[in-house]
Image: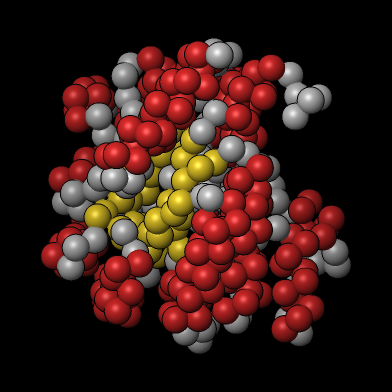
Amino acid sequence: MTDENSIDAFIRGIPKAELHLHIEGSLEPELMFALAHKHGVELPYANVEELRNAYQFDDLQSFLDLYYAGAAVLRDEDDFHALTMAYLERSHADGVVHVEIFFDPQTHTERGIAFATVIDGIRRALADGERTFGITHRLILCFLRHLDAADAMRTLEQALPYKHAIVAVGLDSSERGHPPSKFEEVFARARREGFLTVAHAGEEGPPEYIVEALDLLHVARVDHGVRCEEDAALMQRLVRERMPLTVCPLSNVKLRVVQRMQDHNLKRLLDRGLCVTVNSDDPAYFGGYVVANYQAAQRGLDLSRADIAQLAANSIEASFLPDAEKQNWQRKITAFAAV
Ligand code: HPA
Ligand code: ZN
C-alpha cells in the first residue's frame, strides 16, 4: 500500500461490503483458458490477450453473449470452487469484509451441469474464504429473465433443498422486454419459501421496471436502478424508504448506460440521500474489482473522503447481515474514517 496515494489507501482500507457481483462475471481470462485446456473446450480466441481485446461492448446484450460463452468452461465442482476462491482473494485484498454474490444456475443447468455441482463448489469456497480471509458471505440465486417464468419456477424448485444456504432470489440478464411482472408468481413463491428478493431494474430498462420490482416483487434492494432519476416520484420514494441501489460504475460505463464516468449520477443520488452502494458487477469483464470501481467513481465525480465513507456505510446498511454485525462494522467504518 506504500505507493498508493492517500485517497486510494483510504478506499482500499475502509471496511466495505460488495452486494452486486455475478460470480460467473469474475472469471478472469487466465482461468478461462486454464479450464478450457483442462476440459478440452475450444475457445474462439488464440490467447488471453485476444480474449481481453474482445471485451468492448455496445450494450448489455453484447456483453451477455460473451459472458454466457465464457461460462461454458465451468464444468465441475472444483471449477466453481476455483472461480469463487479467486474472487474472494481479490476482494480481501480490496478491503471487502462481506460479500453477497449472485450465481446463475440456469447458465449451467441448461448445458447439463447439475445444480448441486454449481452450488456445492461455490459454497465450499465461501466456507474456505471465511476461514482463510475472514470474509462473511450470503448467496443470491438469480433467474435469467430472457428465459420464461416456468423455467425460473423449475430452478426455484431445484433450489429448495438448499434453502438454508441461499438468502435471496434475484433477476438478471437481458432487461428490455423482460419486465419484473413476468416473474411475479415465481417471486411470490420464493417469498413464501422464505427467500428475500432483489432484482436488476433500471439499468437499461425504464424506471417503470424499478416500480414493478418494488410493488410486484417486493425487493429489498434494487440492482443498478440508476434510471430512477427519470421519475421524480420514484426518487422521493427511494429516499423515503431508504431503498438501497447496488450501483456498478465501471459496468455502467463499459455497457454504455452512461457515456463517461463524469456523467454518472452516483454522486447526485448520494447527495439526494439515496442509499447507493458501489459494486463491481462482472469485474473480469468491466475492468476491475471493488476498489477499482470506487477509484474510478472518485476520480470521475471528485468524491470526497466523506462520500467514500458514506458509500462504505451504505454497503453495510444495505447488506443482509444481522443488526449486531452491521453495528459492529459501522463502528469500524466510523473509527477508520476519523483517523
Ligand atoms: N445486468 C444484467 N444481467 C447481468 C449483468 C448485468 O449487469 N451481469 C451479469 N448478468
Ligand atoms: Zn449485475
Q: Is residue 30 left or right of residue 216?
A: right
> x%, y% of residue 255?
57, 43
Q: Is residue 72 left or right of residue 119?
A: right
Taking the spot 62% from the left edge, 35% from the top edge, the residue there is 291
- Viewer-proximal residue among 26 and 201: 26
Taking the spot 26% from the left edge, 34% from the top edge, the residue there is 243
Q: Quadrant of the C terminus?
A: top right
Tell me how the rendering is colored.
Answer: secondary structure
> Can residue 8 be seen in this snapshot?
yes
Q: Is residue 29 left or right of residue 337?
A: right
> x%, y% of residue 55?
70, 51
- Viewer-proximal residue among 21 and 202: 21
- Viewer-proximal residue among 61 and 125: 125
> x%, y% of residue 219?
24, 48
Q: Is residue 155 left or right of residue 53?
A: left
Name the image quarter holding residue 292.
top right
Name the image quarter holding residue 28.
bottom right
Q: Name above or below for residue 146 compared with residue 4.
A: below
Name the image quarter holding residue 75.
bottom right
> Can residue 262 be seen in this snapshot?
no
Taking the spot 59% from the left edge, 51% from the top edge, the residue there is 133
Q: Quadrant of the N terminus?
A: top right
Q: Name above or below for residue 48 compared with residue 309.
A: below
